[in-house]
Image (spheres, rainbow, N blue to C red):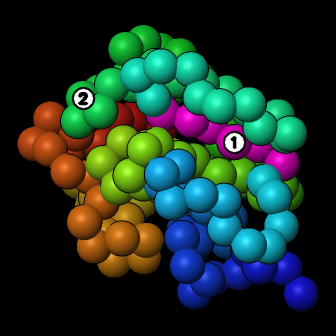
Amino acid sequence: MSTWQPGAPGILPLPSGRLLRGRGLRRGLPEGESPQLGVYLLGKPPPHVPWESHWLRWPDFRLPSDREQARTVLREVWTRAAGERVEVACGGGRGRTGTALACVAVLDGVPADEAVEYVRAHYDRHAVETPWQRRYVARFTA
């Protein structure tokens, strides 16, 4: 049985049925199946992983350095989550990860003004930590 199931720790179920794993890199790799794609939201390059990965330069408590690159990568996250195990991670797994997950939820059809609450209800109640991260999600368009 796959460990990537709705209700499993760190797994965000999207309305379409896609599943994403969010996590904090400081907590280490969870047990179970590895992702097939990882997207790492950090101010510096992430550590090497044995699966395909993308690095989005995204300083802690801030927004992505390149908004167009972020949009492109988040669209790929949404597309590939239809049939692959995809994880999104930052240092703690809440602010940047929550913001990115909320943007992917918008791509999945969640209204932008409801996406932060959706992620807080289904992933982590502390997700999306700053006012500018909330504003970024509210202005994100599919």
Q: Which residue occupies the foreground of this view, 18 or 128?
A: 128
| Residue 103 % position (x, y) | 42, 44
Judged left or right of residue 103, residue 76 is: right
**In the image, which disc is placed on residue 38?**
1
Image quarter in which the N terminus is found: bottom right
What residue is drawn where x is 55% and y is 79%?
9
On screen, 136 above or below 121? Answer: above
What residue is drawn where x is 51% and y is 60%?
27
Determine the secondary structure under disc 1: strand
| Residue 59 % position (x, y) | 33, 25
| Residue 19 % position (x, y) | 66, 66
| Residue 100 % position (x, y) | 44, 43
Question: Earlier along the polypeptide chain: callout 2 or callout 1?
Answer: 1
What's the magenta region?
Answer: 36-41
Considering every residue shown, the one lying at the far left of the view is 131
Find the distance from the CA under tag 2 to the CA under tag 1: 20 Å
Q: Which residue occupies the foreground of this view, 14 or 63?
A: 63
What residue is drawn where x is 26% and y is 52%?
128
Q: Which residue occupies the foreground of this view, 8 or 121?
A: 8
Q: Residues within 10 Å of mark 1 (few under 14, many from 20)?
A: many
What residue is drawn where x is 56% and y is 20%?
45
Determine the secondary structure under disc 2: loop
In the image, what residue type sits under mark 1? Answer: Gly
